[in-house]
Amino acid sequence: MLFAFAHAGYAQNPVIIDQEVRQLMDRAIEEMESGKYQKANTTFREMLDTKKVLPSNMSYLFSKTLYMIEQYHNSKNFLDKYLDLTGKAGDYYEEALALKRALNENIEEIKSCNFCNIFGYRLEHCDVCDGHGSLKAACYYCRGIGKTNCPTCLGKGVIITKNQFDVEEYESCHTCQTVGNVTCKVCSGKKVIDSQCPQCLGSGRSKTKEICDHLPHEHKETKLDN
């Protein structure tokens, strides 16, 4: 998503903020003050969707909103943007520093947690693969047969050559013992192979929509190995 913020250093040539953006900004601030951070989140995203120049303070206020709804990584991105834009001259400089400390603490807690992904969403036992991370599937190489054509005789069981008189000569294939096929080199004749679970991508655990409290929940997840 592409968007641009007005730089706080343009005091001599102030950027004119569009009326639509101002109205959305005022609405988002009211929602924040009322504790309606989910609504404020939606409003701030409407501001981004306008593709118009945004006031630099929006990046801090949006960061605070994202922090309150526990979207810590997105919050950090907008907070860093705010500090880059305004530096110490920003209206919310001290608040931004305090928010940065709080964010770092939360992000570190998420990193050390065994029960959520890097974005802080709870992980639970994958029901698709039963926590194994893989599923049994028909071997792609032999198509579940367990055998493939002999690479030496190409499935004929004999090796056919022509002598100097252009007469065909037949020799038993020692690779397949005249059978014409060999054990599949991929599945070793088992007909099935382990394939990565499409639900959990091999981790054995699936992401939920639940924000993690970093505490173990009985029967809901398996602790990751450190």
Image (cartoon, rainbow, N blue to C red):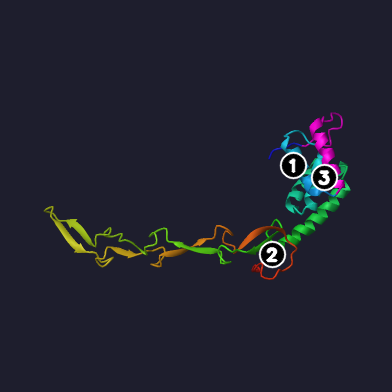
Q: Is residue 151 left or right of residue 128?
A: left
Instruction: Decide if residue 17 is on the left or right side of residue 200.
Output: right
At horizontal 74% and vertical 39% (from top left) the residue drawn is 46
For the point 41% across and 63% down, which residue is it? 186
Q: Amino acid at mark 3?
A: Leu
CA gap, disc 2 and disc 3: 29 Å
The amino acid on which the numbered mark 1 sits, given as a three-letter code, is Arg
Counting from the top left corner in percent of width and height, residue 79 is at 79, 47
- Residue 115 is marked as 2
With 144 as the anchor, is 80 left or right in this view?
right
Q: Which residues are magenta?
A: 5-34
Q: Residue 45 — which label? A: 1
* Neighbour tally class for label 3: few under 14, some 14-19, many 20 plus, Cα within 10 Å: many
Q: Classify residue 14 by image quadrant.
A: top right
Label 1 CA crowd tier, 10 Å (few <14, some 14–19, many 20+) = some
Q: Position of residue 43 (x, y in %)?
A: 77, 41
Q: Nearer the viewer, mark 3 or mark 1?
A: 1
Say the numbered circle drawn on residue 61.
3
